[in-house]
Image: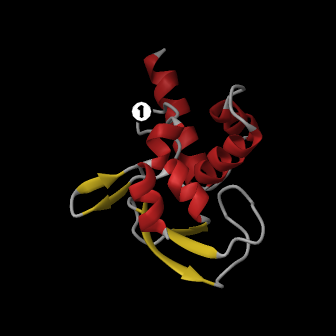
């Protein structure tokens, strides 16, 4: 049985590396208790990062979001958030994938505020301080 699980885990890892995981897997990751907005964000981040652990288990959204860090903000790069799909975003927040250092997502400040930690001088910003810093 353990050998079969190892084979399955290796198949999932290969499929994840080739962006060939089944839609049902993303649906299971999203769950039923999230809002439509949260489901869009979870799916977008899951598609942009590795979702299968080395042992073949599926990573949770809490684990996935830790792969991303806020890099900087620009204006006018895109008008659509790559996380939630919101249109007409003004501030484009650039997120970098910590695992590979090269994958970037451009998202709105609302998604950054809700889902990512902002660390300044070794301290995690929260609440109003985080919102103000993003401005």
Left or right: 21, with 4 as reference point: right
User: Quadrant of residue 90 in the image?
Assistant: bottom right
Residue at screen point 50% across, 24% down: 5
The location of residue 127, given as percent across then percent down, is 43, 49
Q: Which class describes the residues within 10 Å of circle 1: few (<14), some (14-19), or many (20+)?
A: few
Is 114 rendered above or below residue 60? below
Does residue 108 appear in this view?
yes
The residue lying furthest to the left in this view is: 122
The residue lying furthest to the top in this view is: 1
The location of residue 75, given as percent across then percent down, is 60, 83
Residue behind mark 1: 55
Count the marks. 1
Judging depth in this view, the residue of 49 and 82 nearest the camera is: 82
Residue at screen point 76% across, 72% down: 88
The location of residue 20, given as percent across then percent down, is 68, 50
Left or right: 132, with 105 as reference point: left
Residue at screen point 40% across, 52% down: 117
Is 29 rendered above or below residue 118? above
The location of residue 133, given as percent across then percent down, is 41, 66
User: Quadrant of residue 8 in the image?
Assistant: top right
Judging depth in this view, the residue of 17 and 91 nearest the camera is: 91
Please tell me whether mark 1 sits on a helix, a strand or a loop: loop
Is 58 rendered above or below residue 106? above
């Amino acid at each position: 049985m353990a050998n079969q699980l190892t084979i399955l885990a290796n198949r999932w890892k290969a499929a994840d590396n080739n962006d060939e995981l089944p839609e049902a897997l993303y649906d299971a990751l999203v769950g039923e208790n999230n809002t439509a907005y949260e489901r869009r964000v979870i799916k977008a981040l899951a598609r942009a990062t590795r979702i299968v652990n080395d042992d073949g288990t599926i990573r949770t959204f809490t684990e996935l979001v830790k792969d991303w860090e806020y890099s900087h903000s620009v204006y006018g790069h895109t008008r659509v958030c790559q996380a939630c799909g919101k249109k007409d975003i003004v501030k484009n927040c650039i997120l970098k994938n910590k695992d590979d250092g090269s994958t970037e997502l451009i998202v709105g400040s609302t998604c950054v505020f809700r889902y990512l930690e902002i660390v300044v001088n070794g301290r995690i910003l929260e609440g109003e301080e985080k919102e103000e810093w993003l401005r």
